[in-house]
Amino acid sequence: MPALTSLAFLFAIVFKSSKTGPTPPLLQMECTSSVYLPTFHMGSSFFLWLFLIFSVIFSPVSAKHSVTWTYGVNYGRIANNLPQPESVVTLLKAAKINHIRIYDADHGVLQAFKGSGIEIIIGLPNEYLKEISIGEDRAMNWVQENVQSFLPDTRIRGIAVGNEILGGTTIELWEVLLPAAKNVYSALYRLGLQHTVEVSSPHSEAVFANSFPPSACIFRPDVAPFMKPLLEFFSQIGSPFYINAYPFLAYKNDPQHIDINYALFKDNRGIYDAKTKLHYDNMFEAQVDAAYAALDKAGFSKMQVIVSETGWASRGDPDEAGANVKNARTYNRNLRKLLAKKKGTPFRPKMVIKAYVFALFNENLKPGPTSERNFGLFKPDGSISYDVGFTGLVPSAAPPSILVSFKEIAGQGWLRWSYLLVSTAWAVVLL
């Protein structure tokens, strides 16, 4: 049953047990584990209430969510100081993040996420595209080894074929992207996994010729001949359009003409799109609607746009405007609030916005400017980089003597901790 319903049900039982008269034992409750508790009276009902509340809160989350998800995170690993994948699972569960993207199909990561209930989009790296595009047999081998062998315990829900291929500098990859995507889908189809695992390919803003105002956005003339057949294929198999949208990069490249408040979801005049007569008070939604406008002009007005990457650097080089902790905290906190509303954009109000934040951790080995290594929401020890509403693995304000880490609970099992709570309650009652 849903958590809130269960909570109300359990509270009703405890309330009833506090009244005068015999209380029936809790023997046939529908729970994840059966626990026999002797008859409780008024003096101990408080502790039973505590136990039941904790049981509901920490019980395994249903694999099938009853509401639409909107918030995910990219789990990049170009670093030499990151925690083990098992600890990352604990961190994500503590933060209640249930959707992630990784940029490869690392078996250690996929094994660690087994049974977690966290949904994963894995990546087919760019360097594999030529090989996968040659024949279905190679795609089949890759899918069997990196997808089928981990299902259903590891909830792989998508394969990102390449990353930011179209519009990039490696032109030969433009030609093999569609054949690679088709071969991957064919392998999934032959294995009966086409309805379980989605095939997609994320793009950068470089695929657009212009994006201001949003309604004027179109695909670049040199990209369009490759983009249109790719979109036709994705439309046939029901895949969305993934775009990496970074207001940070737009502001960094033109701080003289872009209002920082517009980029950070703060109060500002916004922009007005005269063609659609729509007003935008933040750049993020304008970027999403620009993608919708480009799809509309290309003939794919029904295709959903999902943001595969977005974020803000907490540190940068002297010439990287806006890269600081304050702005990173503001952007990510306000983005999370926006996504929590589960609403659409001005141009597509019925299409709920979904986005994957970049990134889970700072990646100290990434090449490029300083900003590239400073997008993380968390530090390698599991503590927060800055406050956007997450607590990390261990709340720093909790006294060490009473703090039970999520890692201990995950490693030793909730049943043992349930027993500890009941034992503690009984000890207090007996005293």
Image (spheres, rainbow, N blue to C red):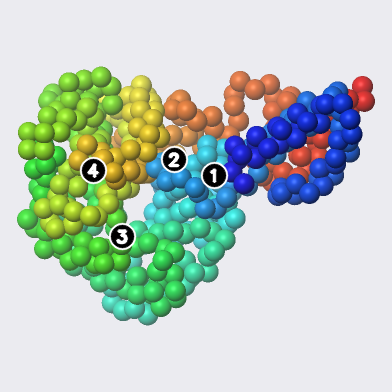
**Amino acid at pointer 4:** Arg
Instruction: Please tell me whether mark 1 sits on a helix, a strand or a loop.
Output: helix
* Residue 272 can be seen in this image: yes
Image coords of residue 311 (percent x, y): 33, 36
Q: Are marks 2 and 3 in contact (CB under 8 Å)?
A: no
Tell us which disc is closer to us: 2 or 4: 4
Q: Which residue is mark 2?
A: 360
Q: Which residue is mark 1?
A: 88
- Kind of residue at badge 1: Val
Query: Mark 4 sits on what residue?
Result: 348
- The residue depicted at 87 percent of the width and 26 percent of the height is 20
Look at the numbered disc 2 and give the secondary structure of its residue: loop
Q: Is tag 4's residue or tag 3's residue first in the polypeptide sequence?
A: 3
Q: Given the current orientation, which residue lies at the most extreme right position? A: 430
Q: Are marks 2 and 1 in contact (CB under 8 Å)?
A: yes
Outermost residue on the front side: it is 21
Distance from the alpha carbon under mark 4 to that under mark 3: 17 Å
